[in-house]
Image (tube, coloured by chain):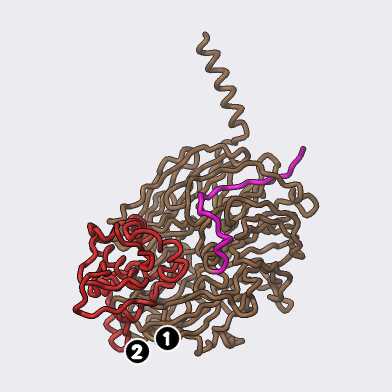
Amino acid sequence: MSRLSMFALVVLVLSLPVTGLAQESASTDENSNSAGGIYTEDQAKRGQQAYFQSCASCHGIRLNGGMGPALTGDPFMSRWGPKRVQELFDFVQENMPLGLAGTLSDQAYADIVAFILSNNGHPAGSTELTAESEALGSTRVDPDAE
Amino acid sequence: MKKSIVAVILALFLGACFAQLEPWQSITEEFLTNPPASAWPSKRRTPNSWGYSPLDQINTENVSDLELAWSIDTGVAGQVEWTPVVANGRMFLQAGATRIMAMDAATGDLLWTYEYEMLPAEERAELGVGGSSTSRGLTLFQDMVIGHFGDSHIVAVDAETGQEVWKTFTDGGGYTSPGIIADGVLISGNSAKGYDRAFVTGTDPESGEVLWKTYMIPGPGEPGYETWEVEGTAEVGHASAWMTPSYDPELNLVYVGTGNPDPYTPQSRPGDNLYTGSILALDPQTGEIVWYHQVMPNDSWDLGSVMETILVDLEIDGETVPALLHTNKGGFLNILNRETGEYIDHTFVVYQNVIESVDPETGRPTYNEEVIPHPGERVIACPSTRGGTDWPARAYSPETNLYYLSGNHVCMDVEGFAWSDGMPMRNIDDIRVVAEGYEDRIGELFAFHADTLEPAWSVEFELPTTAIPLPTAGGLVFAGHTDRFFRAYDAETGEELWGARLTGPIEGHPISYAVDGTQYVAVPAGCCSLVGSAMLRDFAPEALGPAGTGSIFVFKLDND
């Protein structure tokens, strides 16, 4: 795989911090505790990279959809908002990427879900989300539903 | 004695069930080139890709008497972009990622089902091959039904038994459309892997052996490589060729179309980026590129030229021209000389704002620089990456000399991102928006005069459409729509003459065939293609019902 060294020549600079992508992402400072936050900011950054590699081609760089549905905004929240994050995690792991379902690691799936949550109003905290996190079953996708 | 009587009765009963099933006749290339009117043996019926049926039993006078002959639920959900094929009284259908079904074309009796075992997801991920469940048809040849699968395998099964005959792995991104037989060679177009170039293969249809592989982007030292001005860009430029080729046996040329260059934004890959967004004529024996015409140099909007070419001789300015008609995803309709690749004429099918002008000698477009996606600003570019005029097949009728296709007047509110390591190749954020002034007529079914490109008629749809036209010698054009209606129109005027509402959005390819003198019209129905259904989700989610499994519906005249 060529990794395109020539792109160093590109004068346009990409700057897409996670919070920059979030539509309504709650900001967090380094000293915040996990109250209300079921993932960490670093994890959401990892999740962004994993999302870019495996999801963005269909769901869009800003999660606005494309070939696949949007993962933020009203249509997404009306379908997923009332559901537990566990359901979202399971759905993603069992169905995505389309045609390659289940091929990412548990950690990558958790990171991607964290990135999706960061773009849907969930604040970051100090505890990472994992496939075994209790928070998966106790948290709803819509943060305002809690 | 009793046992033998039972056996005789059983044999008579089974014989009655399958009495109409004729013996299998080997499918020759001559049969594929000039099929009997009763057959629809390849995706577009004939190698010229007309998608036209010479049957006229069903016509403008009696089409209102159509009734359901039979139907079958395939049990397969997904993108129902399918095309049944029919020969020797049998219908074959590739449904989804792994299933091929054979049916009695007159009765719908299921003869056999073949389930392809796709490579496990982990292995596909390791190889970099895909796993698309999109399937748009099958290739019939000799005694074989040949399927092209999403994990880059081509598989031949026995037409009478469904038993696997051979299987070939070509190590590409994967197939979504069937190949075509040309001069005894199976020509198949592949999608590119994530960071790669796409290719077209020539395969020995009797053994599955790959005879040649032609990359759709030149390698170092090959002509055209210099059109990727930044080192390293050609090697990952994609140019996927995922549609079924066309073939002219007299010129012995195969015609393939290619997709857009990657990454999507053009700033990082200056140059024309050959052979992306192009139509290529290949030698079927060697894969050599005989000529090419680039429709969209250095494309910025994913408006590729993958779509099928229609090969037809046209009277232009008093001369008979061996022409081809081709409409790219942007609705940029071109006529070329299919012998030389020379540009002849063009028009625009749907609303667009990306092409400002077209060179009258070469057909080369000049772009509207203001709508090229770039960082830091959103622009409105038309059409969207969904098209325009995407993969739904075009058609041509020699009766009317009209060229039929559907499209959508949809734009995208788009922002581009500078390429960097870790960025997806699709490095844009695009939100579909209806083109201004088209809010109440997003989709449209068009008929153009093939020689002048003047509009003949059109049918406007409130909803986005994936209508695929089926012109027939009965003076009809059949086409389905996302509103679940399968309709028949007058081929000359576009007047609606008949309709039946089916189970889901109609985004598959309708065909017509005959068995024992009875004409049938068949159409797949079911959600969820990435054109019509996807845009229903954008613009009219209330019209998009639950995503069930795809079915085939077959109609014939009510003779009671």
Which residue occupies 44% across, 44% down? B157
- Name the side, left or right, on which B13 lies relative to B278: right
Q: How many numbered callouts? A: 2
Which residue has dot 2 on it? A12
The stretch in magenta equals: B539-560
**Disc number at residue B374?**
1
Q: For chain B, give the colour.
A: brown
Q: Who is closer to the viewer here, B210 or B5? A: B5
- Circle 1 chain: B
Task: Name the residue furthest top.
Answer: B1
Residue B169 versus residue B198 in the image, above or below: above
Q: In which quarter of the image is residue A129?
A: bottom left
- The amino acid type, in three-letter code, at marker 1 is His
- Chain under callout 2: A
Secondary element at image label 1: loop
CB within 8 Å, label 1 to label 2: yes
The amino acid type, in three-letter code, at marker 2 is Leu
Residue B315 in sight from this viewpoint: yes
Instruction: Provide residue B50's location: percent of width, then percent of height.
Output: 63, 61
Q: Which label number is shown at residue A48?
A: none
Q: In which quarter of the image is residue B346?
A: bottom right
The answer to which of B542 and B217 lies nearer the viewer is B542
Q: In the image, residue B499 lies at what x, y percent?
A: 70, 54
Judged left or right of residue A99, residue B440 is right
Judging by colour alone, the chain drawn in red in this rendered image is A
**Is B447 a magenta residue?**
no
Q: Where is residue A130 in the image (x, y as percent from the top left)?
A: 23, 62
Q: How far apart are marks 1 and 2 (CA)?
A: 9 Å
Residue B345 seen in the figure: no
Tell me the element at label 2.
loop
